[in-house]
Image: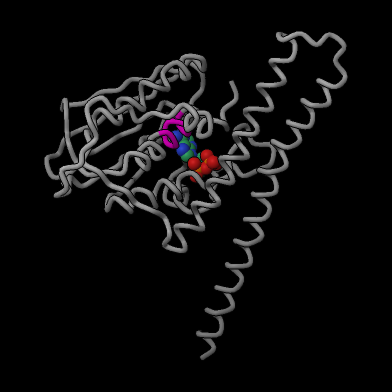
């Protein structure tokens, strides 16, 4: 009886702790971009010379921070849809190799600007399987965005796809700061950040990886991380190869990459 009561009390304390953490993270994540947007507006108001070159810097600041707000709101909406079992999963038969390659190559110009090399490699030319391309795009962009965020200039990111017949393995490996061993499982839970101090170097809400995990669960797949502090991290996704009966299939001409989506998913990264 006492044990049961103690268990209930510690569960209640844990819920209260998570709630406080949620409000503190979300408030900080809302406040920072809003302050930057307001700051940029004030600077523009005080400008005397109003030519295009001089205002473009402030317009970009406002745009990037609006994307950050949009990303946070989208992630919060997605979390509540997932919790309420209302998230729509739309698998179609499509070529996973083309999908992952298109996404990786679409961000190469971006990584170049951060002086990070991004390489895509595959051991198979084509692999048709049922996936939801929209969700795969979110997963890969999220993991690449983290890899960029936590990899210093001069580093390298490798996206590799391997055909294992009954499943496909996708690895996103970086030469970044790495993740301490005791945090490696926790980062897939909501709001976990290795450095959650308000003066941390990178921006983020600690929602990305938990969403990634839910999107992979929808595919009946799995994700794991191998990391060595100071050397880098590798996220390995395993997706089962399933084919739908329907003849509907994405054509070879379909491009999955959506520039707006990249702007949103990469909005935490400052160039
Ligand atoms: P965030 O919005 O904070 O990036 P995520 O859920 O995507 O949230 O990641 C949670 C935490 O996991 C990050 O704050 C960071 O501490 C750690 N992390 C994720 N990916 C990497 C990586 N590639 N290298 C180092 N640390 C990482």
Q: Is residue 102 visible?
A: yes
Give me the residue at 32% from left, 39% from top: 133
Residue 176's spot in the image, x, y percent?
46, 28
Residue 201's spot in the image, x, y percent?
62, 32
Where 65 falls versus 44 (above or below)? below
In reply to whether residue 144 is colored magenta, the answer given is: yes
Give 12 or 69, whichever is nearer the viewer: 69
In reply to whether residue 164 is colored magenta, the answer given is: no
Q: Which residues are magenta?
A: 141-147
Give 247 or 82, whichever is nearer the viewer: 247
Give me the residue at 36% from left, 25% from top: 104
> What is the quadrant of the C terminus in the image?
top right
Give me the residue at 30% from left, 42% from top: 237
What's the magenta bit mostly, secondary-structure-wise?
helix
Does residue 141 appear left or right of residue 121 in this picture? right
Q: Quadrant of residue 162?
A: top left
Does residue 154 appear left or right of residue 9 in this picture? left
Q: Quadrant of residue 226?
A: top left
Label total for image: 0
Residue at the left extreme, as displayed: 165
Give me the residue at 47% from left, 33% from top: 261
Does residue 149 appear left or right of residue 163 in this picture? right
**Please, which colouring scheme is shown?**
one colour
Q: Is residue 178 visible?
A: no
Residue 190's spot in the image, x, y percent?
51, 53
Residue 130's spot in the image, x, y percent?
22, 44
């Amino acid at each position: 009886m006492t044990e049961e009561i103690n268990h209930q009390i510690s569960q209640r304390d844990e819920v209260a702790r998570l709630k406080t953490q949620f409000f503190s993270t979300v408030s900080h994540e809302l406040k920072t971009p809003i302050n930057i947007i307001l700051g940029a507006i004030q600077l523009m108001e005080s400008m005397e010379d109003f030519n295009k070159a001089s205002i473009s810097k402030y317009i970009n600041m406002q745009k990037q921070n609006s994307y950050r707000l949009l990303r946070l709101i989208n992630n919060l909406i997605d979390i509540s849809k997932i919790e309420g079992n209302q998230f729509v999963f739309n698998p179609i038969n499509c070529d996973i190799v083309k999908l992952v390659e298109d996404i990786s190559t679409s961000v190469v110009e971006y990584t170049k600007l951060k002086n990070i090399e991004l390489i895509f490699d595959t051991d198979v030319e084509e692999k048709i399987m049922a996936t939801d391309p929209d969700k795969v795009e979110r997963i890969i962009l999220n993991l690449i965005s983290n890899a960029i965020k936590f990899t210093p200039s001069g580093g390298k990111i490798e996206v590799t796809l391997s055909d294992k017949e009954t499943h496909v393995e996708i690895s996103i490996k970086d030469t970044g700061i790495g993740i301490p061993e005791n945090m490696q499982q926790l980062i897939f839970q909501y709001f976990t950040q290795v450095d959650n101090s308000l003066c941390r170097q990178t921006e983020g809400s600690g929602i990305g990886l938990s969403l990634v995990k839910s999107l992979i669960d929808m595919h009946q797949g799995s994700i794991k991380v191998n990391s060595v502090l100071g050397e880098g991290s590798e996220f390995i996704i395993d997706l089962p190869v399933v084919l739908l009966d329907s003849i509907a299939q994405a054509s070879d001409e379909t491009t999955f990459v959506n520039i707006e989506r990249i702007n949103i998913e990469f909005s935490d990264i400052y160039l």
